[in-house]
Amino acid sequence: MRIGDLAEKSGLSTDTLRYYEKIGLLPRALRDAGGRRVYDETILRWIDFLDRLKATGMGIRDRLRYAELRTKGGASLTERREMLEAHRRKVAGDIAKLTDMLDVLDDKVELYRKMEAGETVDPAFESCARTEHGSQPVVKDQSFDHSTSTRAPADAKSQP
Amino acid sequence: MRIGDLAEKSGLSTDTLRYYEKIGLLPRALRDAGGRRVYDETILRWIDFLDRLKATGMGIRDRLRYAELRTKGGASLTERREMLEAHRRKVAGDIAKLTDMLDVLDDKVELYRKMEAGETVDPAFESCARTEHGSQPVVKDQSFDHSTSTRAPADAKSQP
DNA sequence: CTACCGGTTGGAGTGCACTCCAGGTCAAGC
DNA sequence: GCTTGACCTGGAGTGCACTCCAACCGGTAG
């Protein structure tokens, strides 16, 4: 498999694949007689996992660190596990944040619908969209880190 | 309230607040006799909502568009609602993606723990972490857009 | 033989979202 | 009166994550 095929199968551009190799996210590829990169299917698993780490908000630095550890083999298992556990906590926190936002959006959409229909909105509830006001993380889950969402002093309104 | 106080209350830096005003995310603030920005509390609601849009992955362009619509008042209600509905679909998709990733991470952490404990992993399951394999979105929700996650051809393994 | 396609390299350019800085103004406290 | 500190402006700089480009090379089809 050459870089074009891999690009197609992985969904990344050839430029991105070369860039990833340059910075060390992908191992240096074997070359054919003409100096062209040759890949086997297994690389797809790694790319797929990298992609997931990225899609779930892990920055390039951490992905790089993880890739680096991976090349060191078994000795790095513990550190890799710790990285994944830390990422798991971040992901769980993000899910909670997004789930909260879903409620906020639903309320706001509801309000806008009413206003579009010409209903007069009680001044006391004008522009009101239920926000955090201490809503507990919705994910029923033990190892969960709220540190990322402990920030807003729970203002209950939001002007449209 | 001057910009320093607002920075403290909102969690944004004074530079960011001025930058937001410059690009139009925040309305041009009133000034005191000395030309300094003066804010009232209501701006916090707007900043808070902007912050949520950002935290849930809305880019500055769209936030800008929304802010622009907001200044146009009631005539823009429908478009604003449509934007929020589109964002809701994105957020719901993101939650599904993150929830999938949670499972992947749990499996990988589990595997690493076993390997750390010295258990020999069956070669057939070596480096195996259950991935998507068609897991339905976990969010029990009707108006949901999978378009963002219809991408990977479900490769079941991922080299650690 | 040559046109063309897909690959190679190093390096420059892009877009986002800030972040920092120089050089200046203003109001209040000592 | 002078210092201090918060604020002002315009513009430059930063970090991330690509993305594009010029100039070149190698294999294959017509």
Image (cartoon, coloured by chain):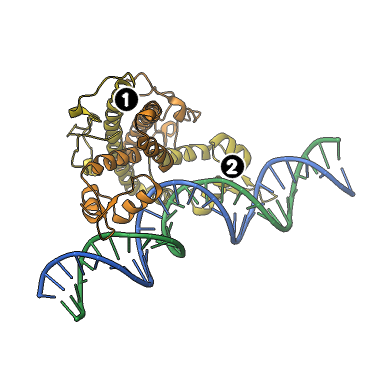
Chain colours: A orange, B yellow, C green, D blue
* Residue A10, horizontal then vertical, whole percent: 24, 47
Q: Are labels 1 and 2 assigned to the same chain?
A: yes
From the viewer's side, name the closer residue of A20 and A99. Answer: A20
Task: Tell me if I can see residue A10 in this picture.
Answer: yes
Q: Chain of mark 1?
A: B
Q: Residue at x 27, y 26 (%)?
A: B107
Q: Residue at x 45, y 33 (%)?
A: A157
* Residue A119, horizontal then vertical, whole percent: 33, 38
Task: Tell me if I can see residue A159 in this picture.
Answer: no
Q: Label 2's element?
A: loop
* Disc 1/disc 2 C-alpha distance (Å): 53 Å
* Residue C15, horizontal then vertical, whole percent: 41, 56
* Residue B65, horizontal then vertical, whole percent: 40, 51
Q: In front: mark 1 or mark 2? A: 1
Residue A137 relative to residue C25: left or right:
left
Q: Chain of mark 2?
A: B
Residue that label 1 marks: B112
Residue C2: image quadrant is bottom left
Residue that label 2 marks: B39
